[in-house]
Image (cartoon, rainbow, N blue to C red):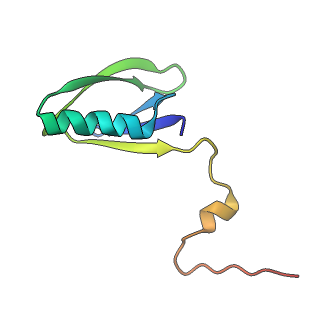
Amino acid sequence: MKRIGIIYAGREFSVGEESFEQMKADIEEAMRSGRSVWITVNHGEGRPQPTELLVGPGIPIALLPIPDEPPGPADEADGVEGQTSSVQS
C-alpha cells in the first residue's frame, strides 16, 4: 500500500508513502499510553494541503489502505453475493 485514506471528523484525508501497519501501530500505542499525537496528512484534491490531525484517546479515526492498483472488473465481481460467473471452453 502506498496510500492511506483517513476519515476524521467526517472528512476525508490521505497520507502517501506511509506504511499502513506502522501508522496503525503508532496510533494504537498513543491510545494505549493515554497520550495524544499529531499526524501530518493531506487534505484536498489536485493540490493537497498538508494538515495536522490530533489523534488520541476518545478521538475517532478510521484508516483505509488504498491499493496501488484499482480493482479490475474480475476483482469487483469477487465476493458479490448472488453473482455467478461462467467459464466457457
* Residue 62 visible: yes
Residue sitting nearer the eye, 23 or 89: 23
* Residue 9 visible: no
Above or below — where is 41 with respect to 79? above
Please give left or right for residue 64 compared with residue 55 in the image. right
Above or below — where is 88 with respect to 51? below
Q: Position of residue 41 (x, y in %)?
A: 38, 25
Residue sitting nearer the eye, 52 or 36: 36
Q: Quadrant of the C terminus?
A: bottom right
Name the residue furthest right: 89
Residue sitting nearer the eye, 31 or 39: 31
Q: Position of residue 77 (x, y in %)?
A: 62, 68
Quarter occupied by residue 82: bottom right
- The number of callouts visible is 0
Q: Position of residue 56 (x, y in %)?
A: 18, 33
Please give left or right for residue 61 compared with residue 70 in the image. left
Q: Position of residue 47 (x, y in %)?
A: 52, 19
